């Protein structure tokens, strides 16, 4: 079975929320089969930032929707947007 890499952009409830707290808030909402792979903070303006996160989830029906719902339900997340989803290869062959 393969996996999906889901990339989501998250905005905090305000500029006073540190990115580390926002990330922990999102991590706390992820299910046990969802793994946070990477995160990146991007400045917007006037102290406001967005957090782009990559979540790896097993390739099952509805998995991407479940990730979106989990991230949107994070207490410190004001808004979230799916940027993209890609299937990860379970095995790479030598070329």
Image (cartoon, grey):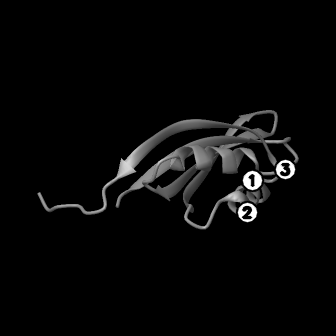
Q: Quadrant of the N terminus?
A: bottom left
Q: Are marks 3 and 2 in contact (CB under 8 Å)?
A: no
Q: Which of the labelled discs sits on residue 19, or is there none?
A: 1
Q: Spot the residue most to the front.
A: 61
The residue shown at (60%, 49%) is 66
Q: Are marks 1 and 3 in contact (CB under 8 Å)?
A: yes
Q: Nearer the viewer, residue 13 or 69?
A: 69
**Which residue in the structure is indicated by mark 3?**
17
Task: Kindly report the distance in space between the C-alpha atoms of the residues bearing marks 3 and 2.
Answer: 16 Å
Q: Spot the residue most to the left.
A: 95
Q: Quadrant of the C terminus?
A: bottom left
Query: Is 85 left or right of 36, judged from the image as shown?
Result: left
Specify few, some or many for label 3: CA neighbours under 10 Å numbering under 14, 14-19, or 20 or more.
some
Specify few, some or many for label 1: CA neighbours under 10 Å numbering under 14, 14-19, or 20 or more.
many
Q: Spot the residue most to the top.
A: 45
Q: Which of the labelled discs sits on residue 28, or is there none?
A: 2
Query: Is 43 left or right of 88, judged from the image as shown?
Result: right
Nearest to the eye among marks 3 and 2: give it.
Answer: 2
Task: Kindly report the distance in space between the C-alpha atoms of the residues bearing marks 2 and 1.
Answer: 14 Å
Query: Is 19 left or right of 95, judged from the image as shown?
Result: right
- Name the spot of residue 9 as percent of width and height, x first: 63, 40
Describe the element under mark 1 as helix, strand or loop: helix
Q: Earlier in the sequence, mark 3 or mark 2?
A: 3
Specify few, some or many for label 2: CA neighbours under 10 Å numbering under 14, 14-19, or 20 or more.
some
- Name the spot of residue 50 as percent of width and height, x first: 69, 41
The residue shown at (76%, 58%) is 25
The residue shown at (63%, 62%) is 31
């Amino acid at each position: 079975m393969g996996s999906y890499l889901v990339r989501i952009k998250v905005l905090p409830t305000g500029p006073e929320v540190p990115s580390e707290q926002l990330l922990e808030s999102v991590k706390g909402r992820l299910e046990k089969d969802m793994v946070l792979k990477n995160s990146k903070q991007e400045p917007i303006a006037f102290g406001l930032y967005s957090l782009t996160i990559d979540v790896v989830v097993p390739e099952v029906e509805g998995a991407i929707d479940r990730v979106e719902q989990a991230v949107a339900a994070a207490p410190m997340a004001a808004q979230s947007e799916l940027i993209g989803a890609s299937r990860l290869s379970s095995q790479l062959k030598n070329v």
